[in-house]
Image (cartoon, grey):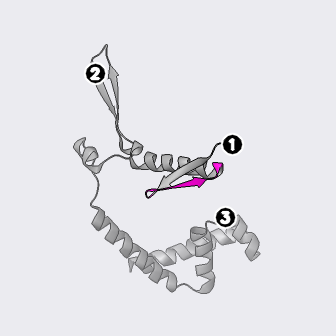
């Protein structure tokens, strides 16, 4: 078995075969993320004398806007989203413990109505009905 070495920060160190393979793969992943995803590719058709640009998987905002894509302002979207989250948290605080538990289980922890009904010893219909009542209550609370 041949010796394997790796160089990091100007220091060369002997490493095991497994570690060498791992480092080689991780270096390749980093190169893929930092460079390959950002490169556009070109398809050249010699007969038609055309060049088709195949956009990189990580496209630049400038290039997308140049070809006519429109995006909302990020800062205003962020503020709106933050305000909505705060309003939702405030509305959730006004629910009683049972209502909050049901909403958290269904929407935050993504449990099924059936699973939650089994835990609570009620029918799925009851869980669904309660969910809709609570959502209406939250909507009224948020919309004022």
| Mark 2, other Cα within 10 Å: few <14 / some 14–19 / many ≥20 | few
Residue located at (41% from left, 79% from top): 87
> Which quarter of the figure has residue 119?
bottom right
Residue 112: give its label. 3
Task: Say above or below: 46 vs 59.
Answer: above
Residue 28 sits above or below residue 140 on the image: above
Which element carries disc 2, helix, strand or loop?
A: strand
Does any portion of residue 122 appear in the rendered image?
no
> Label 3, label 1: how many angstroms apart (C-alpha)?
54 Å
Closer mark to the observer between disc 3 and disc 1 = 1
Q: Between disc 1 and disc 2, whose residue precedes?
A: 1
Q: Residues within 10 Å of mark 1 (few under 14, many from 20)?
A: few
Residue appearing at x 66%, y 64% in the figure:
112
As displayed, is residue 39 above or below residue 124? above
Q: Nearer the viewer, residue 95 or 38?
A: 38
Q: Could you say which is closer to the camera, residue 86 or residue 128?
A: 86
The magenta segment is 9-17
Q: Can you give x and y, in whole percent of width and height, for residue 117 in the image?
A: 72, 70
Q: Is residue 140 left or right of residue 18?
A: left
Q: CA distance from mark 1 to mark 2?
A: 52 Å
Work out whether residue 49 or residue 8 is closer to the camera in this orientation and state it.
Answer: 8
Find disc 2 in the rendering and name its residue.
Answer: 50
Quadrant of the drawing holding the C terminus: bottom left
Position of 123 with respect to 28 (left or right) is: right
Read off the residue under disc 1.
Answer: 1
């Amino acid at each position: 078995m041949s010796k394997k070495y790796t160089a990091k920060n100007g220091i060369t160190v002997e490493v095991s075969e497994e570690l060498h393979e791992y480092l080689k793969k991780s270096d390749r992943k980093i190169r893929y993320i930092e460079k390959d995803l950002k490169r556009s590719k070109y398809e050249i058709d010699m007969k038609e004398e055309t060049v088709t640009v195949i956009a990189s998987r990580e496209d630049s905002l400038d290039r997308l806007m140049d070809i006519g894509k429109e995006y909302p302002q990020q800062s205003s979207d962020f503020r709106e989203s933050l305000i909505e989250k705060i309003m939702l948290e405030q509305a959730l605080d006004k629910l009683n413990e049972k209502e909050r538990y049901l909403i958290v289980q269904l929407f935050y922890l993504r449990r099924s109505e059936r699973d939650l009904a089994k835990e609570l010893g009620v029918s799925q219909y009851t869980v669904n009905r309660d969910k809709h009542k609570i959502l209406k209550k939250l909507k009224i609370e948020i919309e004022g």
